[in-house]
Amino acid sequence: MYAEDTTIYVAESSPDKVVVVLNMVVVVLNSVLQKLYEWCRRNCLIPHCGKTECMILMRSQFVGPLQAVSLGNSVVTQVKSTRCLGVELDSDLNWNVLVKELTKSFTQKLNLLRSLYFLPVSARADFYFKVILPSVTYGLVVWDSCGKSLIDVLEKIHVRDQVLARCNWFTINCLYYYRLFLLAPDCFMIFHQLLLSSYLKNMIVTTNCEGN
């Protein structure tokens, strides 16, 4: 029996002295992992070291020695790509691995759809738009930044199926902008709350200064 997966991240924005900065990041990460390991022991939980992975996210290629990331007495495996919340992440954040995986999955699912030729067109269209397409476009708002060339690969598969010829359909890019539109009110509310919080803090500081 397994509990939910846990993701720990440490961020550093400094572009200078990459090796030094990354080793500092690893020191902080090891400290956090040690606390996590001790917390698990105290609460009679066993962290699965064999399924624990670490990954360096950066645009440029990292070359240089790096301290080992450890969990308890085990060394954590460093990987180039991993799955997080159903989305395949790669260390360069260019989404090549994800799009390749989606292309294969998309093609297989459309082949399954074609084998259901005996069903009415409306039933096959429902299956496509309610089952296949949502599974392919999951996390689209995050990975649509992969670039036009990779999106075009999925777009060609999307428009290729004959079921779509008789339906009103949207391109994947249209779906992306539609989902952004749905997220806009939530983003506005969060931004508004942050602005209001910042304004209140500044007003309190100003009042205190004037009182003194």
Image: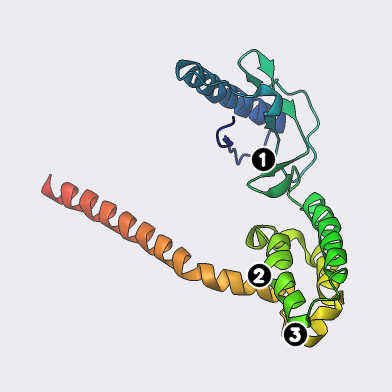
Check whether the beta carbons of the residues at disc 1 and disc 3 lie within 8 A of each other: no
Label 3 to label 2: alpha-carbon separation: 19 Å
How many residues crowd mark 2 within 10 Å: few (<14), some (14–19), many (20+)? Answer: some
Callout in the foreground (3, 2): 3
Amino acid beneath label 1:
Pro
Contact (Cβ within 8 Å) of mark 3 with mark 2 = no
Disc 2 marks a residue whose amino acid type is: Tyr
**Residue at horizontal 77 percent and vertical 43 percent from the top:** 60
The residue identified by callout 2 is 176
The three-letter amino acid code for the residue at tag 3 is Cys
Report the residue marked by disc 3.
167
Quarter where residue 125 is shown: bottom right
Q: What residue appears at the point 65 percent right and 19 percent down from the top-left corner? A: 70
The residue that mark 1 highlights is 15
Q: Where does the C terminus fall, quadrant-wise? A: top left
Query: Of the residues under marks 1 and 2, which one precedes in the sequence?
Result: 1
